[in-house]
Image (cartoon, rainbow, N blue to C red):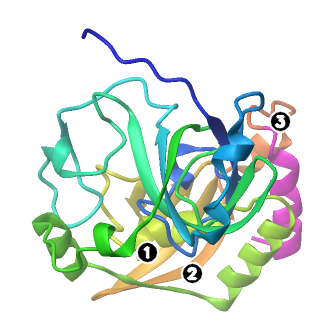
Amino acid sequence: MDSVNFSPIGFFHSEQKHKNESGRQSNEELSDGYIELVSGQNFEQALIGLEGVDRVWVLFTFHLNQNWNPMVSPPRGRDEKIGVFATRAPYRPNPIGMSALLIQKIEGRRIYLKNADILDGSPILDIKPYIPYADSWPESRVAWLEAGDRARYQVSLSPQTQSQLDWLKQNGVTQIKSFIMNQLEYDPTNEKKKRVKEMDGYFEIAYRTWRIDFLLAESKVGVLGIRSGYSESELSSPEDTYLDKDIHRQFLDKFKT
């Protein structure tokens, strides 16, 4: 058998649209989303009984990945690369992902899910119930994750940062907080894995056209604030590649940064 072909049973929808907005696993900082099953396939019957299931395994494809790598850099715990089969990295020979997610509700062909680590537009391959006695093995060991947990940072947000995040969320920049928490929790200053650089007495990490300033103290990260990544001359230019200069101008006027 030279190939195996699958057709999506549906597609995932959420506000997480870019690679750096997805978490490494489902967590409370991530956006909720929903699977919309395709019509005309009798999937309404296939959903019968799922209302009595708390969590499901969702199998999907990493649709934004165009290549695979036999060796990848784990998101935490070590700088040396490790075999992709020892990780859940998206750069796989067959770009299949899996996530255990909490069901919020089911309406028609839509399954609403909590705190999903799946990007908008991801094709869904299958849905299976999470069965605790078969799927939960708390004593199982992953050595590189153990090392990473020992190197975990506690991330705290300054009042200014929280105020900025609230304003940005109200104005459509919804994924920046989850980016901050996920990117700074492990290896916050690793330039090989992140768009981060050392400044004069602090660090800066880039999220699209925004910049986040933070400090390190032992095992703690203190987020100082958020800045526009545009210079004054760039903001005065009519060119707007990412269609976001207006929100940056409003942000600067609001916070006088």
Specify the quadrant that holds the C terminus: bottom right
Disc assigned to residue 45: none
**Label 3 crowd (10 A; few <14 / some 14-19 / many >=20):** few
Mark 3 in CB contact with mark 1 (< 8 angstroms) = no
Could you tell me the amino acid type at mark 2?
Leu
Q: Nearer the viewer, residue 119 or 6?
A: 6
Decide if residue 102 is on the left or right side of residue 236: left
Q: Is residue 157 magenta?
A: no
At x 88% / y 49%, what residue is drawn? Answer: 246
| Residue 12 visible, this angle | yes
At x 66% / y 80%, what residue is drawn? Answer: 161
Decide if residue 28 is on the left or right side of residue 66: right
Q: Nearer the viewer, residue 247 or 33?
A: 33
Tell me where residue 157 appears, x and y as whole percent. Answer: 57, 85
Specify the quadrant that holds the N terminus: top left
Q: Which residues are magenta?
A: 243-257
Mark 2 in CB contact with mark 1 (< 8 angstroms) = yes
Disc assigned to residue 237: 3
Q: Which residue is mark 2?
A: 224
- Rounded to the nearest angstrom, the CA distance separating label 2 from label 1 is 9 Å
Q: Secondary structure at mark 3?
A: loop
